[in-house]
Image (spheres, grey):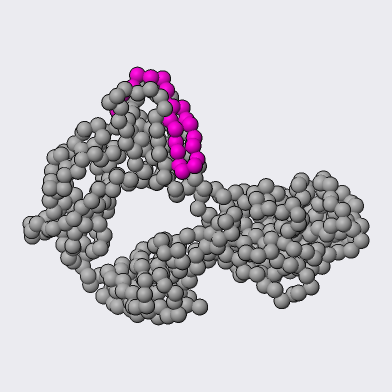
């Protein structure tokens, strides 16, 4: 009995000890490591001169790894062959840089890691580490500072590349398309400021590029660009601060190879906005009754080309002309099924008070009889309207006055629309509704210190334009029937008076039109009217 009691006490104490140990282990995990790694030494030393090594090692006091290296690594001047940098996916107590490129003589290089070197456990970064060396007898020490802002968006993207091109006898503006810059850096933080260091004195062109292909060159189709108008002088002047505005250029016109996509329908693709000057001519032999018609596709950069009669040929040859640019294309012809006429109304459901009804067709409209359109409100009262046919967009625009909380029945009787192939519509009915005015808000914008004309817009947080007015003189600008929500007011200085925002162009050395935003978000509430005072710089 006594032995059993002793055994019970022994095992009870042991169990309590184990539980107590386990509890201590769970409660106390130690403080989180927030200390960045420390560099112990570099071989060769940082800021070495007469550099001729093919390998660099940077030793740390703990295990490190690289994170987002391809995004953050910037080498200035750029090397034709990017160095091999390890470790990548694993951890090590040193970072190795293996150089395979032939380095330029008497040149200062800077390898900028940004925040890509982090410790292995908590990923604390070694902030903005730069390894600098010179193949000559001294380290170049001049610098250029500035900032990059987006020309049209409220916020600027991070990781904008900033380039310096030497303005020597070989310089041309086309260098941004073909060659690496002399020096390079990028904007890493949210302030979008930049600083290019370790420069030689001289004359340079300063350019910013949102380099989406990461090739250190400007590609109009994918990249954005900004530039300083004049050449800059890099000297001992440390007060200069350059402001660049980044924009997406309007694409230069380019015709793309056409293709047959259905019976007697060919898609002529293009890039650029100058499609209204395009002319499409058939070079192949055609019967005397050959006809054609085309219009701009609603969603894509394409001209939809229709022809008749059906041709029993293997291919057709076309000439596509846009001002002085002429292209010739061959299109293979197959016995495909022809499209059927489809009409689509936009909007559907709710319609805003000042919004027109647009009816689009998938085949060119050749006849439009507006007398066969009827609009009735919820009291079955006829509603007067005006209408017009846009042959470029292949749409019918119907405009009519609307009242609140009403329902409008729009009817297209048979033969309202006749298409290129002489097919007409059957009876079509569309139902549209307006909301109550009490559920909407109004706003008056008073703009001070302005140069006119201006495009005044209400945009959401992602920059989508929701409402727009054009102002030609100093007067309050009223916005009626706004949907409740949060908006920024954006003002575009329409310097060329064409009614739209125009980006810049690097080869033409033109800047984007100036844009200003209100500092704070404006809240539109149901049944409220707000007054917004906007003083421009």
Q: Is residue 182 left or right of residue 226?
A: right
Magenta extent: 308-330
Q: Position of residue 412 (x, y in %)?
A: 15, 45
Q: Is residue 108 left or right of residue 442?
A: right
Residue 310 picture quarter: top left
Q: Residue at x 84, y 47 (%)?
A: 102
Instruction: From this view, report whether residue 214 is shown above or below residue 353.
Output: above
Q: Position of residue 405 (x, y in %)?
A: 17, 65
The answer to whether residue 2 is seen in the rendering is: no
Q: Residue at x 23, y 64 (%)?
A: 353
Q: Residue at x 35, y 32 (%)?
A: 265
Quarter occupied by the N terminus:
bottom right
Q: Position of residue 345 (x, y in %)?
A: 25, 48
The answer to whether residue 330 is seen in the rendering is: yes
Q: Residue at x 63, y 64 (%)?
A: 228
Q: Is residue 270 left or right of residue 41?
A: left
Residue 26 picture quarter: bottom right
Q: Position of residue 372 (x, y in %)?
A: 13, 46
Q: Nearer the viewer, residue 214 or 21?
A: 214
Q: Please identify the dominant SS of the magenta region.
A: strand
């Amino acid at each position: 009995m006594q032995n059993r009691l002793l055994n019970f006490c022994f095992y009870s104490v042991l169990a309590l000890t184990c539980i107590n140990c386990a509890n201590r282990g769970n409660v106390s995990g130690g403080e989180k490591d927030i200390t960045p790694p420390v560099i112990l030494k570099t071989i060769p030393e940082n800021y070495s001169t007469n550099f001729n090594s093919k390998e660099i090692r940077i030793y740390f006091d703990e295990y490190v790894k690289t994170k987002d290296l391809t995004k953050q690594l910037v080498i200035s001047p750029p090397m034709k062959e990017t160095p091999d940098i390890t470790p990548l996916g694993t951890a090590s107590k040193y970072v190795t840089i293996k150089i395979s490129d032939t380095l330029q003589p008497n040149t200062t290089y800077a390898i900028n890691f940004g925040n890509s070197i982090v410790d292995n456990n908590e990923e604390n970064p070694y902030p903005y580490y730069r390894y600098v060396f010179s193949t000559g007898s001294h380290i170049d020490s001049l610098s250029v500072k500035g900032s990059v802002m987006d020309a049209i968006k409220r916020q600027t993207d991070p990781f904008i590349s900033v380039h310096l091109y030497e303005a020597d006898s070989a310089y041309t503006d086309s260098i941004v398309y073909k060659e690496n810059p002399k020096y390079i850096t990028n904007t890493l933080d949210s302030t979008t400021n930049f600083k290019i260091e370790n420069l030689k004195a001289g004359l340079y062109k300063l350019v910013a590029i949102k380099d989406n292909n990461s090739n250190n060159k400007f590609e109009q189709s994918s990249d954005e660009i900004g530039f300083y108008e004049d050449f800059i002088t890099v000297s001992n002047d440390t007060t200069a601060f350059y402001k660049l505005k980044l924009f997406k250029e309007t694409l230069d016109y380019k015709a793309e190879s056409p293709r047959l996509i259905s019976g007697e329908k060919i898609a002529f693709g293009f890039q650029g906005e100058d499609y209204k000057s395009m002319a499409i001519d058939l070079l192949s032999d055609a019967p005397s009754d050959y006809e054609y018609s085309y219009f701009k596709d609603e969603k894509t950069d394409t001209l939809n080309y229709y022809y008749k009669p059906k041709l029993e040929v293997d291919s057709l040859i076309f000439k596509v002309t846009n001002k002085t640019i002429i292209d010739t294309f061959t299109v293979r012809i197959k016995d495909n099924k022809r499209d059927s006429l489809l009409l689509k109304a936009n909007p559907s459901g709710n319609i805003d008070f000042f919004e027109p009804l647009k009816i689009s067709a998938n085949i060119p409209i050749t006849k439009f009889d507006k007398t066969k359109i009827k609009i009735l409100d919820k009291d079955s009262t006829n509603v007067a309207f005006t209408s017009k046919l846009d042959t470029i967009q292949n749409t019918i625009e119907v405009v009519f006055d609307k009242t609140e909380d009403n329902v409008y029945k729009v009817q297209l009787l048979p033969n309202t629309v006749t298409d290129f192939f002489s097919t007409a519509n059957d009876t079509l009915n569309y139902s549209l509704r307006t909301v109550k005015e009490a559920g909407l808000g109004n706003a008056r914008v008073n703009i001070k210190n302005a140069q006119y004309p201006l495009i005044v817009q209400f945009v959401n947080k992602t920059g989508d334009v929701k409402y727009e007015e054009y102002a030609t003189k100093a007067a309050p600008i009223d916005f009626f029937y706004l949907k409740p929500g949060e908006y920024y007011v954006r003002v575009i200085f329409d310097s060329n008076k064409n009614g739209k925002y125009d980006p810049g162009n690097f080869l033409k050395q033109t800047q984007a039109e100036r844009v200003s935003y209100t500092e704070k978000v404006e809240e539109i509430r149901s049944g409220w009217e707000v007054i917004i005072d906007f003083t421009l710089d």
